Image (cartoon, helix red, strand yellow):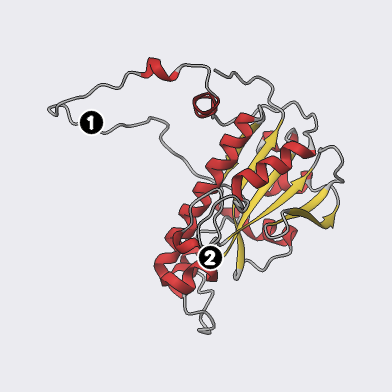
């Protein structure tokens, strides 16, 4: 039986229930063996009136529909480098501040509960032109990359993402973290739900922007939290890793 960890027994953090849940669902090396049913189930109402959707109208030469229809997880990468321009486009169009929006508060490319925007973005760069291998942080305010740690972290990412093969050939890994208090200060324990929703919003934007740029992406939820946090230099309590998305040149990717 896995040991239950109370990460806030000292009452230093008033959001103990949600964050204890987060701590006790972290992947450790001895928690990686899972089995699952691959059958997909669908809920239907057989006796309900049905209004059919005609999908033919969506198969048109249109950037928006083409981007949506081509969104998919890609696990076969060529290993070739990506351009710094594409990487910066993905970061800005996924989570940057929309300076052309005339709303009275900060607006970004994704929604966030209470406009709290608790997420941070780090990038483990393996092969990107004009960028040295290492760990970068996306500075939202200045809209720039900050080079915070030099080195080739591919082997460590491969190990800490449970040896998933596509890490070996992707060009970069986008690591999404959360600073819990930004949202939970306003919404309390329920804010933890909103933070996970925020991560999903951001993940989909990364997928769609990458699809538009003809790049491949695949989301990773199974990784060793503490090891990833160590690479980023974060404590895992105030700020912790939530989500990783591998990015690279796809082997075969069809677009409408």
Query: In the displayed image of the protein, which residue is found farthest to the front?
Result: 102
Q: Residues within 10 Å of mark 2 (few under 14, many from 20)?
A: some
Q: Is residue 46 left or right of residue 88?
A: left
- CA gap, disc 2 and disc 1: 36 Å
Q: Residues within 10 Å of mark 1 (few under 14, many from 20)?
A: few
Query: Label 1: which residue?
Result: 44
Say which mark, if any, is on residue 91: none
Image location of residue 181, percent across then percent down: 53, 71
Q: What residue sits right under mark 2 in the picture?
A: 23
Identify the secondary structure beneath mark 2: helix
Choose between 150 and 114: the one closer to the eye.
114
Q: Is residue 80 left or right of residue 235?
A: right
Against 252, is 191 above or below? below
Which residue is at a point 54% across and 28% down the rendered structure image?
Answer: 67
Q: Nearer the viewer, mark 2 or mark 1?
A: 1
Above or below, comparing residue 204 to residue 73 in the picture: below
Residue 232 drawn at (x, y percent): 73, 59
Residue beneath the point at 58% across and 19% down: 255
Position of the C terminus by quadrant: top right
Q: Is residue 2 visible?
A: no
Q: Is residue 7 left or right of residue 163?
A: left
Towards the viewer: 54 or 203 = 54
């Amino acid at each position: 039986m896995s040991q239950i960890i109370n990460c806030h027994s000292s009452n230093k953090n008033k959001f103990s229930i949600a964050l204890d849940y987060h701590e006790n669902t972290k992947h450790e090396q001895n928690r990686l063996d899972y089995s699952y049913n691959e059958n997909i189930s669908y809920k239907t109402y057989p006796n309900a009136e049905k209004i059919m959707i005609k999908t033919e109208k969506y198969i048109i030469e249109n950037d928006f529909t083409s981007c949506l229809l081509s969104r998919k997880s890609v696990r076969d990468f060529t290993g070739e480098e990506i351009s710094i321009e594409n990487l910066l486009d993905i970061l800005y169009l996924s989570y940057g501040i929309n300076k052309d929006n005339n709303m009275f508060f900060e607006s970004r490319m994704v929604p966030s509960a209470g406009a709290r925007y608790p997420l941070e973005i780090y990038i483990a760069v393996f092969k990107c032109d004009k960028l040295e291998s290492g760990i970068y942080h996306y500075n939202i305010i200045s809209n720039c990359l900050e080079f915070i740690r030099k080195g080739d972290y591919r082997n460590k990412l491969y190990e800490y993402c449970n040896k998933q093969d596509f890490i070996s050939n992707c060009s970069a890994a986008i690591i999404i973290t959360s600073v819990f208090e930004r949202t939970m200060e306003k919404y309390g324990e329920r804010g933890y739900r909103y933070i996970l929703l925020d991560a999903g919003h951001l993940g989909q934007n990364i997928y769609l922007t990458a699809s538009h740029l003809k790049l491949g992406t695949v989301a990773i939820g199974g990784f060793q939290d503490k090891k990833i946090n160590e690479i980023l230099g974060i404590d895992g309590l105030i700020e912790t890793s939530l989500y990783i998305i591998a990015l690279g040149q796809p082997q075969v990717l069809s677009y409408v």
